[in-house]
Amino acid sequence: DAAMKEVQRLDDLLSTGNPDSEVSQINTRGNGTLSKDTEAILTEAMEIYKETDGLFDVTIYPLMQLWGFPTQKYHVPAESELQEALAKVDASQVVIDGNQVSLGINQEMDLGGIAKGYTSARVMEIFREYGITSGMVSLGGNVQTLNTRPDGKPWQIGIQNPNGQQGSLLAVLSVENKAVITSGGYERYFEEDGNTYIHILNPKTGYPADSGLVSVSVISENGMLADALSTSLYLMGEEQAAEYWRTHADEFDMILETEDGTLYITEGISQEIQTDNATIVLNTEE
């Protein structure tokens, strides 16, 4: 019950769809006072923005609105519309001073790409506070685990097959005390004139991701990091994602699926995964 209340509290705080949320109020005014939770999330988001060379950008909300993903009133924008929205997307204009934040002109932020990771980590903290020794939470593509299963064996986390029937699995991963967070275009998309447009938008181009990847899973003890990186690595594509991982291999592992069905798996989890797909193990040395 305490965990469920916390999930609801954080949703009320962070949801862009709720005009009374803290995030919506800051978006309306262009500035505001951050609660402890929002300050922690935004501070981490800004750090990942720098680390990913701007691919994880919390000011992407005007672009999301333009494409119609928050409202499901989908729209393929004209180039002029895209350029107008892109002018508002630049997290370097966000200034955090203690618990105060100010956005750039006409900017709006959306913490949806990192908030679930923070929420699942908070649920783990609540489990520990209540003496839970074995637990798991799933928040739609976002799984986090506490210790092992009650029988002492690792948790078995299924990763959805983006090309298969609903419920079919791409892989099964054994984990303990880790977050497993997956991003894929199959989650939210629309079709128009024979083209498919996914909800993972590139903040540099304004268009949906087209990196050759169809699914990215990030495995880390840090739920916020895993959440944000699952989107960023999806945008990077296989080669750049592998390069990024080699620089940050002590922070996370990952599973990448390319359009031809090949899985790229980092060496840290190569013994913990079951899959029928062709697999390439990524090592820290190129």
Image (cartoon, rainbow, N blue to C red):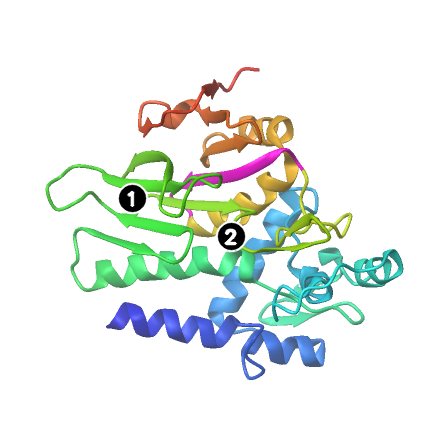
Residue 120 x, y percent position in the rendering: 37, 58
Name of the residue lying farthest toward the front: 194
42 over 182 or under it: above or below: below
Quadrant location of the C terminus in the rendered image: top right
Q: Is 217 part of what is drawn in magenta?
A: yes
- Label drawn at residue 77: none
In the picture of the structure, the residue carrying the numbered disc 1 is 177
Please state the extent of the stretch shown in magenta in the rendering: 211-222
Q: Is 90 part of what is drawn in magenta?
A: no
Q: Main secondary structure of the magenta part?
A: strand
Quadrant location of the N terminus in the rendered image: bottom left
Residue occupying the point 59% across, 48% down:
48
Residue 170 visible within the image:
yes
Helix, strand or loop under label 1 = loop
- Label drawn at residue 187: 2
Name of the residue lying farthest toward the top: 286
Residue 42 x, y percent position in the rendering: 57, 61
Q: Amino acid at mark 2?
A: Glu
